[in-house]
Amino acid sequence: MLRIGPILSFRGQVEQRWRVTVLIGVSRAQPPPELDLNGAPSEPPTLLYGGPQDAYWRYDVSIQLHQAERSLSYGIEDQDARWSFTVPARDHPKLSLTEVLLDNLGHDHVLNSNADDLRDHWSHDDHEGERKRLIETLLHLGEKKRLRTCIVSGDVHVAARSGIYRQDTPPAASWAQIHPFASSAIVHPSMVGVMERLFLQLINRTAAKAQAIDVQHTVEMMLFPCHHRYVMAARNWLAPEVDADAQRSQLWATWRCENESGFSNHLQTVPAAVLN
């Protein structure tokens, strides 16, 4: 009889292997249940805690990364239910690749800190744990208070928007969606150098595919409003405005981006979380 679980936790990537931990709690008198991954038995678990009534077992799973993203199923002996999680592709591109390019090929514009900006980016290896904790905290708050979170960030020399989702909730659970908006400081010039344009092309190509943060959360770049690319490389500023209509509350996010003839407007709306 299960007391708790199975609870999945992402442990990181080592070389070409994706590591996941599964936590299962059972009665103290019960032997550790057998966990299978795609029908194959897992390695024997480790006893994390054994009390008078309960025992909590940790199963460490290491999965070889393949060329393409794939979904794996897992289950427990004598249990009809099965679950699944996604393992990303082996060569999924990361911003660190662009960081290496900029560090080695140099910069030919006044923005001489692009690589430093990339190290500050959430997807950098130094910040992945911090990003995961923040996302989990915001989604927990959203579920408890039935709120939808929008994040405004800046100082990246571009304008962009994205979405963060929980994979184990239905689309109707709007609280399980986070909407980050990015806007550069208005004094920053746009990216016009040769290497910076190559950098933007790489970012727009890699942004076309969703990225798995862990087994529960996915981040996806969205096409910039009224634009055919994911990143708007222009001097810009963002005006968020709340429309607190009692029947249809929503957030209006309007970017004003510099162009040759003046400014263009790019509008995105985010409805309030649905109360159910």
Image: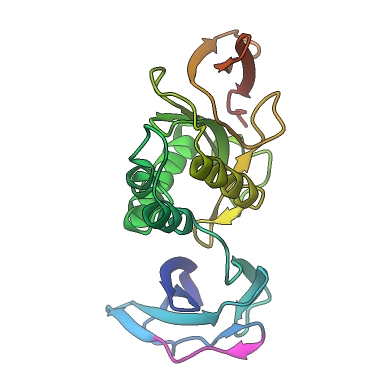
Tell me residue 219's x, y (percent): 55, 48
Quarter of the picture containing the C terminus is top right
Quarter assignment of residue 64: bottom right
Q: Decide if residue 190 is on the left or right side of residue 224.
A: left
Q: Nearer the viewer, residue 222 or 39?
A: 222
Q: Decide if residue 188 is on the left or right side of residue 49.
A: right
Total labels drawn: 0
Give the main secondary structure, helix, strand or loop, of the magenta stretch: loop
Q: Which residues are magenta?
A: 39-45
**Residue 101 among those drawn in magenta:** no
Tell me residue 180's x, y (percent): 50, 34
Quarter assignment of residue 174: top right
Residue at 50% over, 41% down: 196
Residue at 49% over, 27% down: 190
Instruction: Examine the rendered structure and indicate whether residue 143 appears above or below residue 103.
Output: above
Tell me residue 134's x, y (percent): 37, 45
Q: Nearer the viewer, residue 29 or 114?
A: 114
Tell me residue 12's x, y (percent): 41, 69
Q: Nearer the viewer, residue 94 or 233?
A: 233
Instruction: Examine the rendered structure and indicate whether residue 121 appears above or below residue 128.
Output: above
| Residue 244 can be seen, yes or no | yes
| Residue 164 can be seen, yes or no | no
Q: What coloring was used for the rendering? A: rainbow
